[in-house]
Amino acid sequence: MTDFENVATHRGVGGSRGWVVAPIHTLGDPAPRDRYILVADDLTPADTAGLDLALVAGFCTAGGGPTSHTVQVAHNLGIPAVVAAGPLVLTVVSGTMCALDGDGGLLHAGLHGGDLRSARDRENEHAQRDRLRRERALAVGPVAGGVTLSTTLVKPAQAAEVARSAASGIGLLATELLFLGREGEITVEEAHFRAYCDLARAVGDAEITVRTLDIGGDKPMPALNLPQEDNSFLGVRGLRLALARPEDLLIPQLRALYRAAAGGAHLRIMFPMVTSVEEFIRASQIAEGIRSELGAPRVPLGVMVEVPACALTIDLFAEQVDFLSIGTNDLSQYLLATSRTNPDLAHDMDPLHVAVNRTVAQVADAAAAAGVPVTACGGLAASPVGAVVLASLGISGLTVTMAAIPAVIEALSRLDDGARRMIRHQALTTGGTGHLTEHVSARLAL
Ligand code: PEP
Ligand code: MG
């Protein structure tokens, strides 16, 4: 069912929130000069990061999944995205006027007359609501409902926006694009060093948590000439890859980070896709060697909790690390054995599944017992319902996209102790995105 009478509605899954109205442009057709909604079979994370936001209002893909890296990039850019809409969406003719509903996961195609007017009214209402939320979030500041909000950043060029947002700092700087976007003869170390120093200048005293390279899975990097893998999500990815190629990947990045820290940058270093404590110890020994060679200050070292083995041994990790951050996208994928990128499973991906909630609660409890700070990031943290559930499960810091901060602050501001207890109980017994969305929305009037 849609609110429109004479349109064809393509149903996918909401990837990144928002509502925009514009003609569509199918990738491969001659490029229009005015703002459009991009329609494509699929997009890589790097394609998405390179979109010209002066022209691309949002996108809809036939394939993909709601927690894919492509969607994470869309979240970070603040544009709506619908994925897994199926191949029929590719038959909509370029130039057709459409409304893209990133919350509902719909593309309404062929709007005119009264339908077009009401779609535009809705676009204006969304814009107005977002403006008000942004103002209120700035007034509340980075702590809401006892939870501290930091932001993710995929493009260092967006750093200036961080200082203008309600975020406490950068909780996850993804560095894949720094490796991809290197120019000319400049070395990896030098390119990274300059980028970290520029970022530190842009955000002032705020803390920047830098995630070391997380390549593999659905984030290819052709320049590395990595061998083709049958199952790249279970292959040489994240810290595994960095430890397999320390000379060209891990060491230059760590040297750049410690040089920036020596220059006054307020950094933390976070390793992705860690499976065993031994991996973390190897990485931290390399880091410590570089630090002492450079005479740099100590920098907190932490891991992302994304692999079930890491979650199950969290007490052992808590003895070694300075901080933890739960990556809800990967943790859901691996716990539920549900690919982040398979469009046929897009509706099955349930980051609020009771198994995920229980794992999050166990990690939060173990971290609290050991006195280690634990935050959560990924798509779940950036949705108001997900943020409220994570807070109720004991997570005291969330890293979300800049676009999501106002709505997350608004939701967390409504969370009192009674609601927290009820939501925690529901999350740990029943769980499920559908059930919890209904429960949380009713309880907090979201
Ligand atoms: C995650 O897995 O939740 C996460 C934040 O990392 P990415 O989405 O980049 O894999
Ligand atoms: Mg991840």
Image (tube, helix red, strand yellow):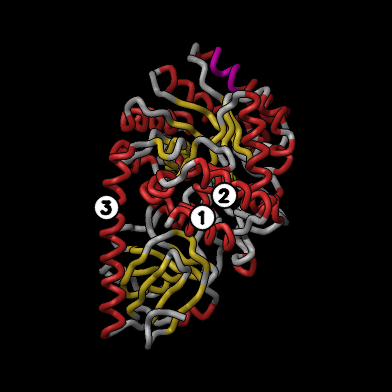
Displayed-image quarter of ligand 2: top right
Q: Earlier in the sequence, mark 1 or mark 3?
A: 3
User: Which quadrant, please, contains the C terminus?
Assistant: bottom left
- Is 431 covered by the magenta stretch? no
Q: Earlier in the sequence, mark 1 or mark 2?
A: 2
For residue 272, which numbered disc appears in the image? none
The one of 305 and 210 positioned closer to us in this rendering: 305
Is there CB contact under 8 Å for labels 1 and 3? no
Where is mark 2, residue-wise? Answer: 423
Q: Is residue 409 above or below residue 203?
A: below
Residue 349: image location, x then y, percent: 62, 60
Q: Is mark 1 within 8 Å of ligand 1?
A: no
Where is mark 3, residue-wise? Answer: 132
Q: Earlier in the sequence, mark 3 or mark 2?
A: 3
Q: Is residue 5 above or below residue 179?
A: below
Residue 240: image location, x then y, percent: 67, 38
Residue 209: image location, x then y, percent: 48, 32
Q: Circle 2: is it few (<14), some (14-19), or many (20+) Cα within 10 Å?
A: many
Mark 2 element type: helix
Where is mark 1, residue-wise? Answer: 440
Residue drawn 73% across the image and 38% down it: 312
Highlighted magenta segment, given as a residue range? 287-292
Location of residue 281 (image quadrant): top right
Left-right relation of 120 to 295: left
Amino acid type assigned to the residue bearing label 2 in the image: Ile
Is there CB contact under 8 Å for labels 1 and 2? yes
The one of 256 and 108 positioned closer to us in this rendering: 108
Q: Kindly report the secondary structure that dominates the magenta region of the rendered protein.
A: helix
Estimate the spatial distance between the alpha carbons at disc 1 and disc 2, rounded to whole Å: 7 Å
Mark 1 element type: helix
